[in-house]
Amino acid sequence: MKCLAMDFGGSSIKYAVVNEQAELEQTGSAPAPLGSVEEFVDSVEKLYLQYRDEISGIALSLPGVIDAETGEHHGSGVYQDLLAGKNVKELISARCPVKVAVENDGKCGALAEAWKGALAGVKDGAVLVLGSGIGGGVIVNGKVHRGYNFTAGEFSFLLTGRDRSIMDAAWMSVGMLGVTYQTCKRKNLDFSVQDAGDVIASFDQMLGDRYPKFDQPPQKIKADGKQFFQWLEEGDRDVTEIYQEFLHSLAILVENIQICLAPQRIVIGGGLSKAQRLLPDLNRELEQLCTDCNISQAMRPEICNSRYLNECNLLGAVYNYIQQYGENP
């Protein structure tokens, strides 16, 4: 039998039916169910009903601090208002009568890479997932390290600047939500047509005063990752400046992970990692950062792309399912 894997992001859900060979079948996406707990559970049940004759279990990847053993969500992440203090396993099992496993999205990324990806055979490593926010996971002695209160690898809360605002936090300076907000403000784009537009609009209450005002109404252009990198290749001045700030913040984040954990390898995954120029650009920025800050080259990290890019959380969720229940899907 197979497993239904679902990766809940800030703007969408990615899903797939995963077979016994860890191959993704029946892949697709749907809008992120951020409106209510009922909407969240409905999104899982809808796919369960569609594939229930094929699957024996459900494996979920979610942002937030999660006890993978019990299924309890302890807050943080874009779903915290819906799920904090609730048992996700129990919510889903009440409507979908199969085995359910749930794990933090960053740890799912690390599990996938340690299982069959870029960290296979690596004793100590780390995974950085660049999505709507920032996911992360740490591998110690070949196993995912959850830490006290399940917060190991929450790289999104590391600081990448000294601005004394939310722009200092990695989830904002390096995550796509923050990049999109800055792009909208610099290019006069409408928040309402963006992925997670309501979330992005909420940043304006804290940060809006630092940007210039426009006389014209905002343009209804969607600034997703594909459009952002297209503008970058075209030499758009505003986007180029935002990208340079993004790269510098990402280099600070990666170097801090290297210094604190000394991993053999840091894997970069998530939707933004699909941009071919990202890794070489990041390597150049890391070299410059180490030179400017007099950091030994021995402390410069080895970085590589995820083997699975933005599919890693789906496979990691399945590997978490296998570890919990001792069986293949």
Image: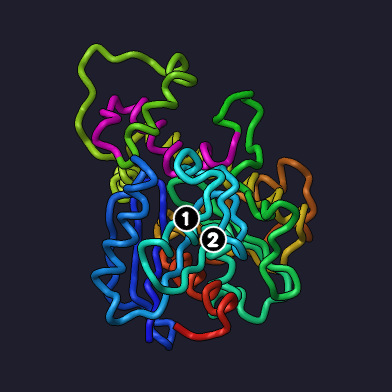
**Who's the residue at 31% across and 28% down the image?**
187
Q: Is residue 229 visible?
A: no
Q: Nearer the viewer, residue 93 or 61?
A: 93
Residue 298 % position (x, y): 78, 60
Left or right? Give the position of 68 relative to 216.
Answer: right
- Contact, CB < 8 Å: mark 1 with mark 2? yes
Furthest-front residue in this view = 94
Q: For the N terminus, which image quadrant?
A: bottom left
Residue type beneath disc 1:
Leu
**Who's the residue at 42% across and 70% down the image?**
58
Q: For the C terminus, which image quadrant?
A: bottom left
Q: Residue 192 lies in magenta, yes or no?
A: yes
Real-space CA distance between mark 1 and mark 2, rounded to the nearest whole angstrom: 10 Å
Instruction: Examine the rendered structure and indicate whether residue 66 appears above or below residue 303.
Output: above
| Nearest to N terminus: mark 1 or mark 2 | 2
Left or right? Give the position of 88 relative to 95.
Answer: right
Q: Using the image, tell me which numbered label, if any, was put on residue 207.
A: none
Q: What color scheme is it? A: rainbow
Dot 1: element: helix
Q: Residue 13 lies in magenta, yes or no?
A: no
Give the magenta-colored segment's residue range: 169-194
Residue 267 % position (x, y): 58, 64
Q: Is residue 111 visible?
A: yes
Instruction: Examine the rendered structure and indicate whether residue 68 appears above or below residue 213.
Output: below
Classed neighbour count for the residue bearing mark 2: other residues with Cα under 10 Å, few (<14), some (14–19), many (≥20): many
Residue at the disc numbered 1: 278
Q: Using the image, tell me which numbered label, if any, was put on residue 268.
A: 2
Residue 279 % position (x, y): 51, 59
Q: Nearer the viewer, residue 71 or 10?
A: 71
Q: Place residue 223 in its image quadrant.
A: top left
Residue type beneath disc 2:
Ile
